[in-house]
Structures are given as structure tokens and as C-alpha cells.
Amino acid sequence: MKNATVVQKASPSSLVLRTSEDNGVATLTLNRPAQYNALSEALLEALENEFSIIATDNTIRVVVLAGAGQAFCAGHDLKEMRQTPNTAYYEMLFKQCSRVMLSMVALPQPIIARVHGTATAAGCQLVANADLAIASDAARFAVSGINLGLFCSTPGVALSRNVPRKRSFELLMTGRFINAKTAVEYGLINQAVSNETLDQAVSGLANEIASKPESAVRLGKRLFYQQLGQPLEEAYASAGERMACNMGFPEAIEGIDAFIEKREPEWS
């Protein structure tokens, strides 16, 4: 991807994933609208490949994850899954999905989920796994596998790391839908806005982050997830080491000097 006003780019599987870029903000659009953007093998592969490409592209500052059609994502493609009814296949599929989720966390650039319609099961997992999420106030969320006799085990990993324990367990055990307002209260998403202002809200947040020094954003995302998995003492040790290193970055030196000198920083 190259910086331009808007650049359309063919993905590894252009039928299931559309990609574009606008001034450092890459948008990945799940493109299976007739299936409510269910995560097929092809779509998971396309996402994994695209995240791998973006991770090495220094022109991309922020990633937006969106869905085409009437929904954000309805979870795994159950029809496709039932075509190969054996445990080895299912283990392969869920490992593939987990690689996608882990690649989202490992991606140097922050990811914003742009949510409209419904986000269910693994679709809700994508929302929870994104670094930030903004939804239409008409959006609905659920980890509803339990209603089909299938506990949403893998979505529960991401959900329980965003939503308080008893709230996430209740959602997993009931399969109940929640609206966007409740999703904000639970901590699943950052904002709920009108459908008419959804794109404006997403682009505003993306552009705000894209305007920050790239080195600090990348370091910050990596440290944020590292310290979450550490005991308190180790977390402070890691954070202290990263801040000491960060103080030597040219962007930090310029930013601090500009603050002291009461002027705007001049970052390259």
C-alpha cells in the first residue's frame, strides 16, 4: 500500500476481503454480505495474509476493520464447517482463526473495529480482539453459540479480556444479545454513535491516532499487551524499561523540547 488519497488494493482473496488506504489509514472490509460476512476459511486466510503485509508497511498507521452489507460479522461459516465433520478439520480451523486473532494483537498498528448490524460469536470476538471499536447505535452483539449447543470457547477468550468476568460469563452462558449502549457500558466497544455519523467517528479516531508519532504508537501497543499478561511487579519493570528507551527516541526528544519551549513539535 502506498500513501494516496484513496488506494484500492486487491487482497489475497479479493472476493471475500476488500482493502483500501486513505492517507495512512488502511480499511479491511469483510466482503461476504450474503453470508453476513461469516468467517470462511478463505476469509480467514485473506485476513491473515493482509495483516502480515500491513505489519511490514510503514506507510500504514492505523487499520480499520469493517463489514460489507447488513452486518459486521456473523461468526464462523457453520455451513462450511458442517461439510467436513471431523475433529481434525475443526482443530485446524480454530487454529487458523486463533492465528488471525493473535496477528491482530501482534500488528504494530492499532486496529479499530467499525461495527454495524450484528456481531455474533467469532464476529463478536473480532470486535473484542480489536484494539478499539466504534459501533452504530443500532448494532447488536452476542456470543450465541450456546443456543446451538456450541459454547463460544474461543470468542470467550477475547470477550473475557474486555468485559468483566461475570458479565462475559453471563453472555456466554445465555447467548443473549446486547445493544450498543450496553456494549459501551460493558467495555466491549468504545463508542456508540448514529449510523449516519459512524464513518465520521471512525475516521476521526483513526486520523487522530495516525497523527501521533509512529514510534510511540507502535511501542505503546506492544507494551500494552505485554504488561497485561504480567504480574504487577514485572509489568512495572517492563513499562519502566520501555519508557526509558522511549525517552531516547527522536520524536520524544522533539516533543518534550517543543513542550518546554511552548511551540508545536516538528516531527518528520
Image (cartoon, rainbow, N blue to C red):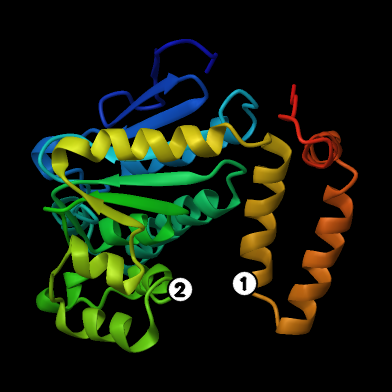
Would you name the residue on which mark 1 appears? Answer: 228
The amino acid beneath tag 2 is Arg
Q: Residue at x 42, y 71 (%)?
A: 162
Element at label 1: helix
Q: Quadrant of the C terminus?
A: top right
Query: Which residue is disc 2 drawn over?
Result: 161
Which residue: 53% across, 49% down? 103
Please, what secondary structure does the residue beneath circle 2 have? loop
Q: Is residue 39 left or right of residue 239?
A: left
**Residue 6 percent location from the top left of the image:** 40, 13
Residue 228 percent across, percent down from the top left: 62, 72
Task: Give the vertical position of 12 relative to 81 (above or below).
Answer: above
**Above or below 226: residue 197:** above
* Vertical placement of residue 191 versus 42, above or below: below
Q: Is any atom of residue 53 visible in this view?
A: yes
Give the image quarter of residue 44: top left
* Image coordinates for residue 47, horizontal then vertical, percent: 41, 39
Pick whichever, 186 or 125, lies toward us: 186
Residue shown at 41% from the left, 45% from the top: 112
Which residue is the extreme one toward the front?
Answer: 262
What is the crowding at mark 2: few (fewer than 14 residues within 10 Å), some, or many (at least 20)? some
Q: Viewed as shown, does residue 134 lie left or right of 95? A: left
Dot 1: few (<14), some (14–19), or many (≥20) neighbours within 10 Å? few
Using the rendered view, name the quadrant where residue 230 is placed: bottom right
- Per the rendering, the mark at residue 183 is none
Query: Decide: marks 2, 1 in contact (CB < 8 A)?
Result: yes
Q: CA distance from mark 2 to mark 1?
A: 10 Å
- Between 1 and 242, the one lying in front of the other is 242
Left or right, residue 201 beside residue 2: left
For the residue marked with disc 1, what is the amino acid?
Leu
Q: Position of residue 170 (x, y in %)?
A: 24, 86
Name the residue nearer the viewer: 261 or 95: 261
